Amino acid sequence: MHKKDIASVVLMVWMLAASNLMGVLYGPDLRLFIAVALVGFFTITYTIRPVFSKPDYIRNIDRMAVAGAALFGLVICLRILELIEYWS
């Protein structure tokens, strides 16, 4: 198997493990699951990046990483607003 094939399998396993752990801990918060899944996605995109060459699929992964970072920032902002509302 190639690195990118293994990476997709590892990401799927990570997301299933995170969703099962959230189910066991009774924490069905979608924003938390998205944040945990994005952490796994960023880790995997960092580990599959080739050192000496730049294949075409890296550009698409970079675009997905930027979109994921924006989504992660949105989740964090919503959490902060939720905490501010709770403390007020």
Image (tube, rainbow, N blue to C red):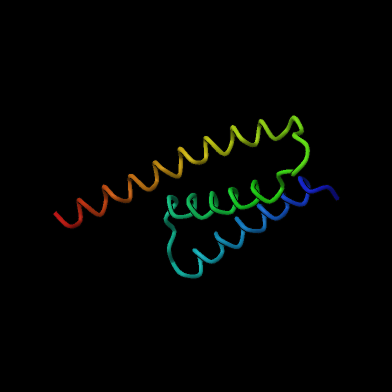
Name the residue located 60 percent from the left edge and 49 percent from the top edge: 41
Direction from residue 53 to residue 45 in the image, left or right: left
Give how far across and how far down residue 59 sits, in percent: 66, 31
Question: Farthest residue toward the bottom?
Answer: 24
Question: Farthest residue toward the left?
Answer: 88
User: Eyeballing the image, is 25 above or below 63?
Assistant: below
Name the residue located 74 percent from the left edge and 34 percent from the top edge: 54
Give how far across and how far down residue 71 sits, in percent: 46, 40
Name the residue located 44 percent from the left edge and 67 percent from the top edge: 26
State the image quarter where residue 61 is shown: top right
- Comparing 57 with 37, the one in front is 57
Direction from residue 80 to residue 13 in the image, left or right: right
Give how far across and how far down residue 55 sits, in percent: 77, 33
Direction from residue 59 to residue 37 in the image, left or right: left
Question: In which quadrant is the C terminus drawn?
Answer: bottom left
Question: How many labels sit on residues?
Answer: 0
Question: Farthest residue toward the right?
Answer: 1
- Comparing 33 with 80, the one in front is 80
User: Eyeballing the image, is 54 above or below 6?
Assistant: above
Give how far across and how far down residue 78 sits, in percent: 33, 45
- Comparing 61 with 10, the one in front is 61
State the image quarter where residue 49 is shown: top right
Name the residue located 33 percent from the left edge and 51 percent from the top edge: 79
- Comparing 25 with 85, the one in front is 85
